[in-house]
Amino acid sequence: MIADYRTSSLFGTDESVAIEEIRRYEYPWQILPHIGEIILKIGATLGDDYEKRGDDIWIHKTANVFPTAYIKGPCIICAEAEVRHCAFIRGNALVGAKAVVGNSTELKNVILFNNVQVPHYNYVGDSVLGYKSHMGAGSITSNVKSDKTLVTVKDRVSGETFETGLKKMGAILGDNVEVGCGSVLNPGTVIGSNTNIYPLSSVRGCVPGGNIYKNQNEIVIKR
């Protein structure tokens, strides 16, 4: 049921500087239109451990940001995060502590919890990635439907749908989700915590937590 994909079900830790703001929303996709304002609100409260670099960009002094990375605000990059060569951060991005944003990875309107890894040629837009989630090389979020209609979230099991009212929504990953290399997470994808997605998958709708997604017709419980 869609209720299984509430914010409280997907994110079971406090591993984000924005966790209080995130938990104001029953469903995590409801936060997407507000990411920019949340970053500005939190940024104004950050202490001397952060440096303000440019307009509305806060970078922790222990973060490692390569000189070739492009960063547009509003953006927060937290402690010990790494933003590698030619990363492209287009704004409205919160990069959690010890997260990795890899070479040529592009971020736009996202929250990455702590220890998230998007390390190699990833596109992540209009999405929230939970604690310790990882996207394999070349895996991406697709955030706009081909017919440009509003995105719906659909539970694959019950058939229940939730109208998001959003034209752009990528993917929501719960804690400890592993996405295999070369996978595409289609608009409105929600993946429950502790689930693995096989490489080269095309994923739609909701995938329950604690499972292995092999293909659209084969989702098995992890043992």
Image (cartoon, rainbow, N blue to C red):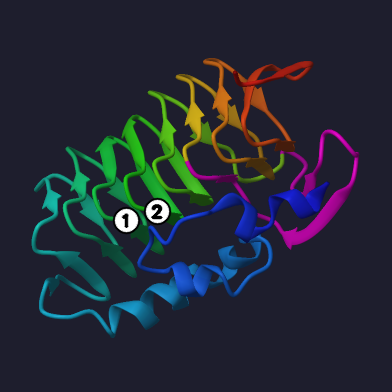
* Nearest to the observer: residue 90 or residue 163: 163
Name above or below for residue 44 compared with residue 107: below
Q: Does the magenta stretch include residue 88?
A: no
- Say what amino acid the circle numbered 2 marks: Phe
Q: Residue 195 carries which label?
A: none
Instruction: Say which element carries label 2.
Output: loop
* Nearest to the observer: residue 89 or residue 21: 21
The range drawn in magenta is 146-175
Residue 1 horizontal side relative to residue 121, left or right: right
Residue 42 horizontal side relative to residue 140, left or right: left
Instruction: Say which element carries label 1.
Output: loop
Sequence-earlier tag: 2 or 1: 1
Q: Residue at x 81, y 41 (%)?
A: 155
Q: Which residue is drawn at 14% across and 71% down?
A: 50
Name above or below for residue 66 compared with residue 73: above
Q: Residue at x 21, y 39 (%)?
A: 86
Residue 82 screen position, x and y as percent: 19, 45
Residue 39 screen position, x and y as percent: 38, 73
Crowd rating for badge 1 (residues with CA inside 10 Å; few <14, some 14–19, many 20+)? many
- Say what amino acid the circle numbered 1 marks: Gly
Figure quadrant of residue 117 = top left
Q: Is residue 161 magenta?
A: yes
Figure quadrant of residue 105 = top left
Q: Can residue 140 be seen in this view?
A: yes
Residue 92 screen position, x and y as percent: 41, 64
Q: Are marks 2 and 1 in contact (CB under 8 Å)?
A: yes
Residue 163 screen position, x and y as percent: 82, 58
Looking at this view, name the residue that lies furthest to the right. 159
The residue tagged 1 is 96
The residue tagged 2 is 113
